[in-house]
Amino acid sequence: QAIEHALRAALQQGEGLALHYQPLFAASDRTLVGAEALLRWSHAELGNVSPLEAVMVAEDCGLIVPLGYWVMRTACRDAAQWQAGGPLRVSVNISARQLGDPQFLERVMDILREEGLPAHLLEIELTETVLMDNMEAGAHTLHRLSQLGIHLAIDDFGTGYSSLAYLRQLPMRRLKIDRSFVKDLPGQEHSRTIVTAIVALAHGLGLQITAEGVETPEQADYLVRQGCDVLQGYLFARPMPVGEFQAQLQEGT
Ligand code: G
Ligand code: G
Ligand code: MN
Ligand code: NA
């Protein structure tokens, strides 16, 4: 109750909500190719509320749609500022209810136009669960989003309730290998087997692969040798406030 009230107030006043950005690097030459937007919420009494909890509360009390659009607009607005040194894509996580919103497509296109971000510089990350919960209605929306140039990625791959059918049926461009499979690389044989299989599956279907949760040089080397396309993890950079991300961009150019 208190947390619902606080979230409502935060959305109305735009206070306490922020996005942090975690850089994404090309496996081939380690150049910066984009950043994932991650929600942060800090409240005077509640302290820092984890994004998982904030999203769960928002789903329960009907605030996920406005919260999701706040995230989408803020990420697109920020990313529109990053383009001076070459194209950088921003990745935005969405939840099941958001994809189920009949206005979703229209609202996203409005946001891109109003914020001046080309569609191909937005990537939407969906978990397997989000896809399964929206198979019927969601498929149409996803095809339209893809036709309009937005990139679609499957997040946390391998951890959800997955049917491989959607990989074939939906216009996904990218698969993100969940960090639980990266954690024990390269030592653990089961993790190696799973990663090798996921990479073969994804590349066979024409999808690019991002490896998440890369924390050691040995993990990075292994993932690059396996053919992963993009690397994300604390080894390279942690999620950081937008100002810090932009400062690093300026240093780099
Ligand atoms: O940033 P952190 O590792 O604490 O994120 C924890 C989880 O919260 C991740 O699974 C991430 O996908 C999810 N998350 C972060 N930001 C958002 C958001 O804006 N929308 C949704 N739906 N999930 C988010
Ligand atoms: O579920 P999703 O992939 O959207 O979650 C991204 C989350 O993973 C972010 O909250 C981010 O803080 C976290 N994360 C990013 N890189 C690493 C890493 O190298 N190790 C760990 N343990 N978590 C990471
Ligand atoms: Mn994600
Ligand atoms: Na993930």
Image (cartoon, grey):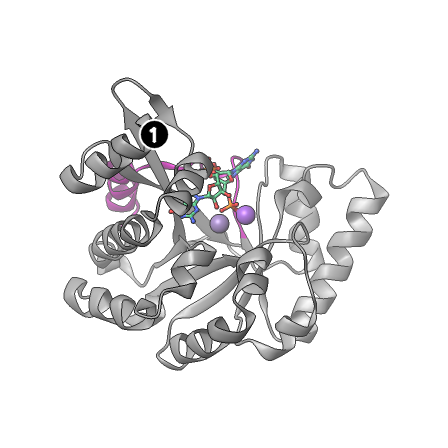
Q: Position of residue 168 (x, y in %)?
A: 64, 77
Q: Nearer the viewer, residue 37 or 161?
A: 161
Q: Nearer the viewer, residue 238 or 172?
A: 172
Question: Residue at the right extreme?
Answer: 189
The amino acid type of the residue labelled 1 equals Gln
Q: In the shown orientation, is residue 166 left or right of residue 234?
A: right
Q: Position of residue 198 (x, y in %)?
A: 72, 60
Residue at (77, 60) in percent of width and height: 197
Instruction: Give the image quarter of residue 54.
Output: top left
Residue at (23, 31) in percent of width and height: 16
Task: Tell me, yes or no, whether the highlighted magenta stretch contains residue 235.
Answer: yes
Q: Position of residue 222 (x, y in %)?
A: 70, 48
The answer, for residue 27, to whether it is visible in the render is no
Q: In the shown orientation, is residue 48 left or right of residue 217?
A: left
Q: Magenta segment range?
A: 231-253
Q: In the shown orientation, is residue 187 left or right of residue 127?
A: right
Up/down of 82 relative to 200, above or below: above
Question: Residue at the front extreme?
Answer: 1
Q: Nearer the viewer, residue 15 or 90?
A: 15
Question: Residue at the top extreme?
Answer: 45
Task: Tell me, yes or no, whether the highlighted magenta stretch contains residue 139.
Answer: no
**Element marked by disc 1:** loop
Instruction: Work out which quarter of the rendered image holds the N terminus and state it.
Output: top left
- In this rendering, the count of numbered labels is 1
Up/down of 188 relative to 147, above or below: above
**Residue to which mark 1 is pinned:** 1
Residue at (55, 70) in percent of width and height: 135
Q: Position of residue 223 (x, y in %)?
A: 67, 51
The answer, for residue 6, to whether it is visible in the render is yes
Residue at (32, 54) in percent of width and height: 65
